[in-house]
Image (cartoon, helix red, strand yellow):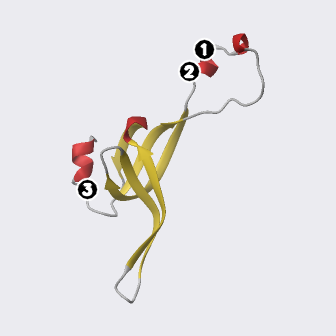
Amino acid sequence: MNFEEIKNLKKEAKIEIIWNDAVNHHGWKEKTSFSDNVVNSVSICRTIGYFFGVTDKLLLVFQSTTHRKSGKDFVNNVFSIPKGCIEDIKILK
């Protein structure tokens, strides 16, 4: 699914996003001790949530929602994923 298709998703559609996150290698180490596997590593993440929106740079999903008697809707745990990190997006049922 591409970002043009994502823009047309209905709000609160359940989606799965596969994306790459940064990896931290902490501690003092000699520069020469880093192998190509370490230098080129990323963390492959899987996020499942409800579509909240898309901007020029980000895909927004949320974890929970509530529809209150007052007529106001609330969302919780809004998560922003940079578009450049996204590998795949699927619509879930």
Residue shown at 39% from the left, 35% from the top:
84
Rate crowding at label 3 as few (under 14), some (14 to 19) or many (20 or more) other CA atoms within 10 Å.
some
Q: How far apart are marks 2 and 1 (CA)?
A: 6 Å
Q: Mark 3 points at which residue?
A: 9
Q: Is residue 83 something that shows in the picture?
A: yes
Q: In this view, does 53 lie above or below 84?
A: below
The answer to whether the residue labelled 2 contacts the one labelled 1, judged by CB atoms less than 8 Å apart, is yes
The picture places residue 54, in percent across and down from the top left corner, at 31, 52
Task: State which quadrant residue 73 falls in.
Answer: bottom left
Q: Residue furthest right?
A: 28
In the rendering, which numbered label is found on residue 20?
none
**57 versus 12 height, above or below:** above
> The residue under label 1 is which amino acid type?
Asp
Is disc 3 in contact with disc 2, using a CB cutoff of under 8 Å? no
Identify the amino acid type marked 3.
Leu
Query: According to the image, label 2 marks what residue?
Result: 40
Q: Which amino acid does label 2 sit on?
A: Asn
Instruction: Pick whichever of labels 1 and 3 is earlier in the sequence.
Output: 3
Q: Name the residue under label 1.
A: 36
In the rendered structure, which disc, 3 or 2, sits on the residue that comes first in sequence?
A: 3
Q: The residue tagged with tag 3: helix, strand or loop?
A: loop
Q: Nearer the viewer, mark 1 or mark 3?
A: 1
What residue do we see at 70% from left, 14% from top?
31
Q: In which quarter of the image is residue 66?
A: bottom left
